[in-house]
Image: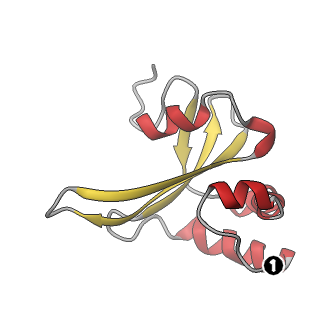
Amino acid sequence: MSSYVWAGLKVRLRSVLTTDWEKFHNNDLDSENARLCDEIHFPRSEEGTKAWAERQSVNASNGDNVFMAIQTLDGLLVGSISTNNCNPRYGTFKYGVSIFREHWRNGYASDAIKI
């Protein structure tokens, strides 16, 4: 395992890059994956997804609430993980993981969760 705190055995977590927009846009078109995650979002234009990626690239976190990209150790973007509803007083939080369909069943989600 790497000594980098945001890296595991298979993946590392990083901020979203503006250049990630197309992979996230294509993932938004996968309704089955959306149903397995949290919800099916309303359709978004390519320009809308580009603007979302731009905002995410400069928005590191909101307290303990954070949205991060998941990439393999060799640099391939494979999905995302987020934390929300974080309550440090009670030590509780929720998290969500989305792995792009072509990368399912490779252990990326479980490695990201462990990180």
Compared with residue 20, is residue 77 higher up or lower down, i.e. above or below? above
Q: Is residue 109 left or right of residue 54?
A: left
Quadrant of the image containing the N terminus:
top left
80 or 20, nearer to the observer: 80
Q: Is residue 7 left or right of residue 101?
A: left
Residue under circle 1? 43
Local packing at callout 1 (Cα closer than 10 Å; few below 14, some 14-19, many 20+) is: few
Residue in the image at 70% along x and 75% along y: 41
Give the quarter of the image for residue 55. Answer: bottom right
User: Could you say where residue 106 lies in the image, as x and y percent from the top left?
Assistant: 67, 27
Residue in the image at 16% along x and 61% along y: 90
35 or 82, nearer to the observer: 35
Residue in the image at 79% along x and 55% along y: 23
User: Could you say where residue 59 lies in the image, as x and y percent from the top left?
Assistant: 50, 70
Compared with residue 77, is residue 83 higher up or lower down, i.e. above or below? below
The amino acid type, in three-letter code, at marker 1 is Pro
Q: Is residue 23 left or right of residue 64?
A: right
34 or 16, nearer to the observer: 34
